[in-house]
Image (cartoon, coloured by chain):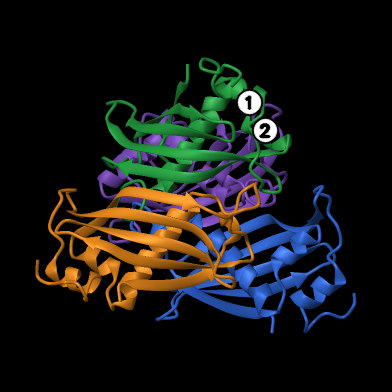
Chain colours: A purple, B green, C blue, D orange
Amino acid sequence: MTETDTTFYVRYAETDTMGIVHHATYPVWFEEGRSHYLRVRGADYAQLEAAGYLLAVSELQARYLAPARYGQQVTIRTRLESLRSRSLSMTYEVLEASSGELLATGRTKLICTNREGQVVRILEEWRRVLDPDRFSGE
Amino acid sequence: MTETDTTFYVRYAETDTMGIVHHATYPVWFEEGRSHYLRVRGADYAQLEAAGYLLAVSELQARYLAPARYGQQVTIRTRLESLRSRSLSMTYEVLEASSGELLATGRTKLICTNREGQVVRILEEWRRVLDPDRFSGE
Amino acid sequence: MTETDTTFYVRYAETDTMGIVHHATYPVWFEEGRSHYLRVRGADYAQLEAAGYLLAVSELQARYLAPARYGQQVTIRTRLESLRSRSLSMTYEVLEASSGELLATGRTKLICTNREGQVVRILEEWRRVLDPDRFSGE
Amino acid sequence: MTETDTTFYVRYAETDTMGIVHHATYPVWFEEGRSHYLRVRGADYAQLEAAGYLLAVSELQARYLAPARYGQQVTIRTRLESLRSRSLSMTYEVLEASSGELLATGRTKLICTNREGQVVRILEEWRRVLDPDRFSGE
């Protein structure tokens, strides 16, 4: 299973004068999707940071198909797209929770660094957490 | 019951360089507590807005007792403190969900206005929603 | 001139636990670059909205090359990339202001809609504002 | 001079469905006022943190008198209200820049801590920076 769903209400503060959710909110939702993806696997990004490793976003893409509004619940569907030795890519779908309408899609590339900002290999234990199915030792 | 609890994870984007949740995040959490308070009663602030009424924050207070961090779940405990003809006050407690430690307290005063920004009376149906116990027709 | 620069200080609230500016801040900076681009031309996006038109972000891309930190000033360099009848694309560079180091690049596609969310043609007066050099009546 | 002004444009992302600046934006503006207050004195909060000291917000108050909107410039007027051995209080006024209309007022109490979160004395060199006029060695 390299896909997880998390569902929550739109926050009023996330909307703008257009009466819809501001587009800069979606990267925050993607990140919440990533956090959930790890938690479901019994992992925790806070642990990774405590161990001296960071997953930094190096690329972000988003497409906005239909607006989200206050009062709605949204589901963030998060998938691992690829896992390399020093980076990974994840994709996201934002769905209106009751209708299932696709509101937005996204992709982020993350690179693993140490606290000094140097790119490093992703630890094997984290590779197993991120991708238990396809992980093969590489 | 004029008190409700809602619990969610701290978002990474809500933290700052100190490694703790930024203090401007708490008013957003208080607002999420208010939204939940209304939803539990079968109401929805989006409906109130659709009917032409706004509840605008006119005063905000917060006390920060202990930091919240990424990786924690927080519970927002929201209470109706007072309900007047044109305004209401709500209080908030932010608790670390697993330990129950009190992280912050808050209070907001909200005034009811129409779309033109004029202060108006809170509709009776909304008074019943906000405070079913103590509501007495006034 | 279809390129403008605006410079401001990183805000503390824009940073995260990594000690760097959170990646979801950059779309907000891009938007501030767009606002500045219009102001420099004597236009104002608030006027466009008052006239019943919205420019909604339909696509967003960002690449993060080096972190920004609190204490730094950043320059947002905004360019009009293309102007079509119903949409436009703008690109962005985020530079550390004192060194000129390139921290991030971005691109957004915006579509013009009315208040009902229908895609409409961009008004000619706005086309002249957006692209005085290359505008040719189309 | 224990008062400084800084002026900037409202950002579109700071507004909400009401068409006005969301109330949780103001603490961020207050903080930007504090940052400016220090910069004007040749100091930099980033330096204080690099030296191992933090100024953490322990109390926040805000009153909202009139809404701010996208398209407006706001001035944040920041004053040092009191300076004690381990804490300080600052007050804020948010003014619409062109008319001078008072939109909001605020106050924050900040306490000085080390990286472990223990409350410590504010360094003398920082006391001089914060309050050059009234500083008397205490």
Which of the chains bears the disc numbered 2?
Answer: B
C21 or D120: which is nearer to us? D120
Sequence-first tag of 1 and 2? 2
Q: Determine the chain carrying the residue at label 1.
A: B
Judged by depth in the image, the label closer to the viewer, 1 or 2, is 1
In front: A83, or D47?
Answer: D47
Q: Is residue D36 above or below residue D61?
A: below
The amino acid sitting under disc 2 is: Leu
* Above/below status of B33 relative to A109: above
Percent coordinates x, y for residue B86 in the rendering:
59, 35
**Is the residue A66 above or below the residue C130 in the image?**
above
For disc 1, the marked residue is: B126
Q: Nearer the viewer, residue A80 or B110?
A: B110
Q: Secondary structure at mark 2?
A: helix
Residue A12 position by quadrant: top right
Circle 2 Cα neighbour tier, 10 Å, few/some/many (<14 / 14–19 / ≥20): some
**Residue under disc 1 on the same chain as residue under disc 2:** yes
Disc marking residue B48 = 2
What residue is drawn where x is 27% and y is 30%? B101
Tell me: C26 left or right of D31. right
Of residues B16 and A18, the one drawn nearer to the viewer in this rendering: A18
